Image: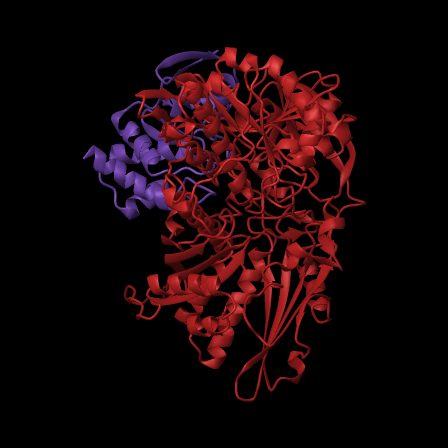
Chain colours: A purple, B red
Amino acid sequence: MITLNVNDRAYQVDVDPDTPLLWVIRDTIELTGTKYGCGMALCGACTVHLNGAAVRSCVTPVSAAVGKKITTIEGLDSKTAKAVQAAWQELDVVQCGYCQSGQIMSATALLVKNRKPNDADIDAAMSGNICRCATYVRIRAAIKQAANSLA
Amino acid sequence: MNAPIGQFKILNASRREFIKAGAGLTLAICTPAAFAAPVPAKAAARTASTAVFEPNAFVRIGADDSVTVICKHLEMGQGTYTGLPTLVAEELDADWSQMRAEGAPADAARYNNLLWGPTQGTGGSSGIANSFDQMRQAGATARAMLVAAAAERWKVAPEGISVKQGVVAHAAGGHKARFGELAEAAAKMPVPAQVKLKDAKDFNYIGKTAPRTDSKAKTTGVAKFTQDVKLPGMLTAVVAHPPRFGAKVKSFDAAKAKAIKGVTDVVAIPTGVAVLAKDFWSAKKGRDALVVVWDDSGAFTQSSADILKQYTELAKHQGATARKVGDTATAGAAKKLEATFHFPFLAHAPMEPLNCVVKLGKDSCEVWNGEQFQTVDQATLAAALGLKPEQVKLNMLFAGGSFGRRANPHSDYLLEAAYVAKAIEGRAPVKLVWTREDDMRAGYYRPAYLHRMAAGFTADNKLVAWQHRIVGQSILAGTAFESVLVKGGIDGTSVEGAANLPYAIPTIEVDLHTTTLGVPVQWWRSVGSTHTAFSTETFLDDICVFLGEDAVRFRLNLLADHPRHAAVLRLAAQRGGWDQPIAPGRPGERRGRGIALHESFGTVVAQLAEVSVDKDDKFRVDRVVCAVDCGIAVNPDVIRAQMEGGIGFGLSAALYGEITLKDGAAEQSNFHDYPVLRIGDMPRIEVHIVPSSEKPTGVGEPGTPVIAPAVANALFAATGKRLRDLPLKLA
């Protein structure tokens, strides 16, 4: 049995230690907001926070998350995260929506570190998150709007 | 498959059961055929007795004031769950906060695409175009019945009753009621034979901006995709596919796979060997451990170079004629320009790799899927399982992208899931999950094409002849649509955008060689236009350079008969500053501006692109100015979003998109070797919508094909180098 702290709740899971955190979150704990996109840390759809830092859960073995605070899209409740989600909704960023949990996790982690990112900062921080609907114009705008609302 | 729009009737599908359950007024809309048939009524009654969720209707008003629009089209990002409710809300005079969207079940009698005859499905940028009258009628009918109910309750004449933002009121009598309070009574009112739709000047939602209905669910992680479905006892299947198209299983050893904890079954199916487990990771580990020997005797084994050689040879000869205007060829012209273009296979690569859930019963099959092609999928699954189409129930969930892929004319991945479920005799519901690698290598690509073009000029430099030859596979060959849609050896999807070239040139000839390869191919966002827009619009640019003409003025001179095209082109040129010099770049950079124009699915789009090229010939697209005429702009912000996204999707292919084959196997597998557009590649984009009172046309696809030629033309302006192969490689 492995004990995990996900969204401030303790879970006992019976999985192999090398199982990627993504599949434990999705299939065992059944929080499905975190998505599978590539399995190789290439697309960012699986992004979660580990002690506040954005990580790709598809290549993070569950054993590496033990004793750490795991936050998924369902558990976002910081002021910064709420500002990001509000900006995403106000600007209607989403299209198909499949990548957007990961985008929001990455954007929130960025704003925690950098309260006023410029375009280059945003492009650098978000470069690991693919959106095939190409909502990138609005992702940039929403991050700036969230930053302004937090200032 | 075209049927006249507007032939439908509205029925009251409300039942006492719904009223008790709080559903209130429910309206169904039927085409004449369905109206005459006895089946739908029975089906409606059957559902009525068992469920709160009424499928056979477009509008449902709850006692809680909610207005739910049952959407017959798949929401895959294009905004149909916002566009269709916009139309209903407009005529119903609802408040936008009341509006909800819900996916329709498979029932072509009621939910057919009115542009596709008796077929239900989403594609060809037809969602709003085919629903514009139908959904407004649905809203107007519901409104009339609410008003009738209010008139009866208040004992006043209906003429004195107004409806505004979800409130029904009679000012003179001081009466007021919300929809929910009237829903039950409205359900008992006769359906009006005719309703009057609003004049455009009275629109409150159409042409304004209603926010997306799915934004909240998709920003909080609660939106349900197929990947997220979990049924009691469900098993997850991961399938080992042969590396080459058309190969079969010779033998397999399941011992190691079965030794993996959690693996329950290893079964052979027609498309490979499936490993089933209690969860994805166990199934994936099982597949990794599986040993399969493939029989390549019937497999496709050519490489991309072999295909190119074959296409180059074919292009030397005349193909089947798709269009002929005038009777001279370029042979007699005094001067001639010629060019050859190459287009690779492209994967759709939606963010959600293909998947679906299948549950088999004794005489039933239930599917959960980002369902794009209901009528075809029902028929195909029914035939494979020995069922009747109506015994196949399809639950339409959000799709994590599709770009055409989920409307597969052979129902490929649905059929695979059904094979797996059948192989375990329906013992458990099965979720088929393809990995990214499975998705990338499964074929059903945008076909590879070769184009040869020639232009003829008189001795005094008048453009008099245009020749366009296309070589490539037919998307429709071998599908149920071939007999209807392939005419005289011409698959319209191979030549669309070329055969309907809008420019007035004295002689035009478009011909086609349809090739046969063992590579499965399929439509890909904007279909034929993905290649024809590029060759026609960059070749026209070549012609302008040859003649020393301005690219905008020259096109405008050839568009006298196409005022909408001309207006769109003018708008993009004007807003993009075509007549002003381009701003200089950073030191050492060359800058260029290019423009392109193309119509697809009845929507005309022009894009002006600005590029910067550094000393190493690396380039970026800085800015795109897009003009679009899609008739009445139902939801301008969704239109802007589709132009932005369409440009990004097209730019992704223009910069990177390429599937290559080696000995019959795809060489790419994931985003490291099939790179796609990332945020740093995304240009600034401005979208300008042409005001129009014409019937609306679609916007999901038409933004995509225009960007590659606009960028190639800009690169020529910056560097003098003409790129005719995609993806664009300058260095």
Horizontally, residue A126 falls left or right of residue B431, namely left
Q: Which residue lies furthest to the left in this view?
A: A151
Horizontally, residue B257 falls left or right of residue B10, namely right
Report the quarter where the C terminus of chain A lies.
top left
Q: Which residue is at 52% across, 16% downward? A: A15
Q: Which residue is at 67% across, 82% downward? A: B331
Percent from the top left, x then y, of residue B218?
Answer: 42, 30
Between B458 and B659, the one nearer to me in the picture: B458
Count of marks, rendered view: 0
Determine which quarter of the picture holds residue B5.
top right
Between B419 and B80, the one nearer to me in the picture: B80
Percent from the top left, x then y, of residue B244?
Answer: 71, 44
Between B28 and A30, the one nearer to me in the picture: B28
Does the image show residue B263?
no
Determine which quarter of the picture holds residue A99.
top left
Percent from the top left, x then y, of residue B356?
Answer: 61, 29
In the image, is residue B94 above or below residue B669? above
Q: Which residue lies furthest to the bottom in this view?
A: B459
Horizontally, residue B509 falls left or right of residue B626, namely right
Between A129 and B532, the one nearer to me in the picture: B532
Percent from the top left, x then y, of residue B413?
Answer: 66, 34
Does the image show residue B83?
yes
In the image, is residue B332 above or below residue A130? below
Q: Which residue is at 50% across, 49% downward? A: B695
Horizontally, residue B178 falls left or right of residue B231, namely left
In the image, is residue B539 above or below residue A141? below
In the image, is residue B465 above or below residue B245? below
Q: Which residue is at 42% across, 66% downward? A: B594
